[in-house]
Image (spheres, helix red, strand yellow):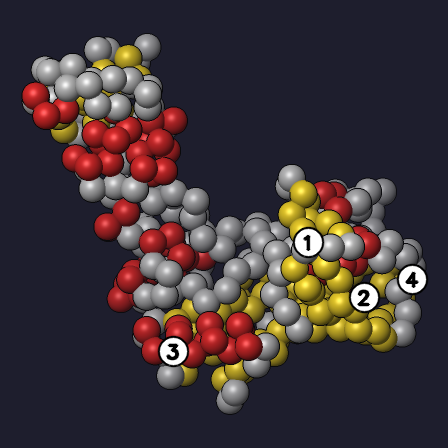
Amino acid sequence: MTRGPAQFAIVTAANGAGERLDVFLARELDLPRHYVHRLLERERVWLGGRPASKGTLLDVGNRLEILPFRHPSEGPHAAPELPLSVLAEERGLVAVDKPAGMPTHPLDFDERTSVVNAFLARYPDAVGIGDGGLHAGLVHRLDTDTSGVLLFANEPRAWREAREAFRSGRAEKHYLARVHGALRGERELVLQLAQRGDHVRVVERGGRPARTRLGAVQRDGETSIVAIELLTGVRHQIRATLAHLGHAIVGDQRYGSPVDCGRHLLHATRLRIGKFEASSPPVEITQWVATG
């Protein structure tokens, strides 16, 4: 089994004898336990010439070799090579135009392909703002395949006020989607949504209340363009609500679309908090043409 060079090594002393490896590393590396588990799963810790296991009980004199990793205290990577289109910037808030297919934030500190990574290249002081860590400066999230307006803050007060606006329903969030079938008229729905595996489902009880306002914009062959206003913020709210109505978003194969167009056709068109407003034209949604 081959591996790269170690970043450093730790030799266990008497006070580490009999201790579980993951507990020992969390203390010695000043890391949360779940992050130690991630390092072990990625084979960044070696013992006796093999990748170490979290449940290993240590002996005096064990030599642990730690392969290079990015410590959470460093924050996510800044990635100046990634594109970042700023839509609006005012009083510590920064709205950017998120491309479809780019994750909102990294899942690990070694990753550098998300909007957060691009944002930190332009606004490095946002590393410790808000939830910090992998969500540095991020006010809310969009699914990877959702494009459009995404909000950050580069000042702590702006982040707190924006988060409160989202929590209290004062943030106006508008989207456009292309869906299967003929969705007509306007309606407002209140559904209970709950996580079920990798899906969000409508349930009768035990879910989170999700308020969504829908309005048909136009019919286009076998699909419709729909304007959506999110009045709450539940995970996959738009996608699960439209699928529940029998109008899955085109390209959203997780929620029943038979079409694979490389993404689901959902776009965050406008966001407004008080006097701060940003908008992004939904070009790909409106110009999409069915093929095959």
Of callouts 1 and 4, the N-terminal one: 4
Please report the residue visible at 61 percent of the width from the left and 65 percent of the height from the top.
233
Do labels 3 and 1 touch, CB within 8 Å? Answer: no
Q: Nearer the viewer, mark 2 or mark 3?
A: 3
Amino acid residing under circle 2: Ile
Q: Which residue carries the number 3 mark?
A: 158
Q: Nearer the viewer, mark 1 or mark 4?
A: 1
- Helix, strand or loop status at disc 3: helix
Of callouts 2 and 3, the N-terminal one: 3
Classify residue 254 as left or right of residue 139. right
Of callouts 2 and 1, the N-terminal one: 1
Of callouts 3 and 1, the N-terminal one: 3
Q: Which residue carries the number 2 mark?
A: 225
Tell me if residue 202 can be seen.
no
Tell me if residue 127 can be seen.
yes
> Between marks 3 and 4, how big is the CA–CA gap?
41 Å
Residue 82: give x, y in percent of width and height. 42, 54
Q: Which residue carries the number 1 mark?
A: 206
